[in-house]
Image (cartoon, rainbow, N blue to C red):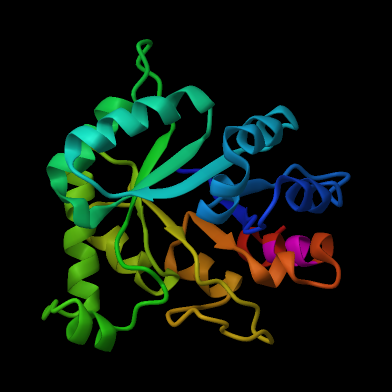
């Protein structure tokens, strides 16, 4: 059975700002997400430093390219000792299989690999009008999740609102990693398909990814603990 956890999205623009933020956590070692902004600013150094400090890392780079390119890129990332990374499911089953092959180390180990279905900033209207996808957003996400499972991936990134239907289509062991988490009293920012930590737990999320409600809070440690209590019940 998959473990459940809260992942903090460290969407900072520098190594210094990130480490200053993590220094606030004296007792906990939160699972952290390093996204494109931070990775492109600080590179492998920030990954190695956060790992050295004892945190689990989700390296969120959303690879999407031809299979051979993704395979070679994943081979490089496999040396960073991250705990989770991802691709875009829209890259096809062949690309996702290539990603698994590249990510797997000579000893057979590898980080968890998940696929992005549809970004939580994408509405069904935008999907239909701008991406010309005529299926409903729910049906699209289910198909993308089924493709990821066929390719051998561990799970998908989806909004918490779709975690339940992904579980129904792909089984309880297939992981759902869900951004778009907000406290009941906070704003949506640029997210569209969102919910609270408590509701994400009820729907079936395995991991929730929380950014600004924690990182922009007056007391980030207390906000993190509030999130953990809401999602994990402790």
User: Is 137 placed above or below 145 here?
Assistant: below
In the image, 112: left or right of 224?
A: left
Foreground pick, 128 / 222 = 128
Dominant secondary structure of the magenta stretch?
A: helix
Q: Position of residue 25 (x, y in %)?
A: 84, 49
Q: Quadrant of the C terminus?
A: bottom right
Counting the numbered discs, the total is 0
Foreground pick, 111 / 232 = 111
* Range drawn in magenta: 223-227
What residue occupies the far front of the structure in this picture?
41
**Residue shown at the point (53%, 26%) measured from the top left:** 81
**Residue shown at the point (69%, 59%) measured from the top left:** 228
**Residue shown at the point (60%, 76%) measured from the top left:** 182
Is residue 163 at all visible to an observer of this figure? yes
Residue 230, image quadrant: bottom right
What residue occupies the far top of the structure in this picture?
107
In the image, 173: left or right of 151?
A: right
In the image, 86: left or right of 146?
A: right
Q: Position of residue 133 (x, y in %)?
A: 14, 76
**Residue shown at the point (67%, 84%) measured from the top left:** 186
User: Is 41 placed above or below 214 here?
Assistant: above
In the image, 50: left or right of 113?
A: right
Is residue 1 at all visible to an observer of this figure? no
User: Is 205 placed above or below 72 here?
Assistant: below
Q: Position of residue 127 (x, y in %)?
A: 23, 80
Foreground pick, 78 / 117 = 78
Q: Quadrant of the N terminus?
A: top left
The question of residue 31 being in magenta is answered with no
Q: Position of residue 190 (x, y in %)?
A: 51, 80
Residue 162, image quadrant: bottom left
């Amino acid at each position: 059975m998959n473990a459940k956890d809260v992942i903090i999205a460290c969407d900072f623009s520098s190594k210094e700002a990130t480490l200053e933020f993590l220094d606030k956590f004296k007792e906990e070692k939160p699972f952290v997400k390093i996204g494109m902004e931070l990775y492109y600013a600080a590179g492998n150094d920030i990954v190695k430093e956060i790992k050295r400090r004892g945190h689990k890392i989700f390296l969120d780079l959303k690879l999407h390219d031809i299979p051979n390119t993704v395979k070679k890129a994943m081979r490089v990332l496999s040396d960073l000792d991250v705990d989770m990374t991802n691709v875009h499911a829209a890259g096809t089953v062949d690309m996702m299989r290539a990603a698994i092959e590249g990510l797997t180390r000579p000893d057979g180990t590898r980080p968890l690999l998940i696929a992005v279905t549809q970004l939580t900033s994408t509405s069904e209207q935008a999907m239909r009008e701008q991406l010309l996808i005529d299926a409903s957003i729910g049906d699209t996400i289910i198909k993308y999740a089924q493709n990821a499972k066929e390719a051998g991936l561990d799970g998908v990134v989806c909004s918490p609102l779709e975690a339940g239907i992904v579980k129904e289509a792909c089984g309880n062991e297939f992981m759902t990693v869900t951004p778009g988490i907000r406290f009941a009293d906070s704003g949506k920012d640029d997210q569209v398909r969102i919910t609270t930590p408590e509701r994400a737990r009820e729907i079936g999320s395995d991991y929730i990814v929380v950014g600004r409600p924690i990182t922009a809070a007056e007391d980030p440690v207390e906000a993190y603990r509030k999130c953990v209590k809401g999602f994990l019940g402790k």
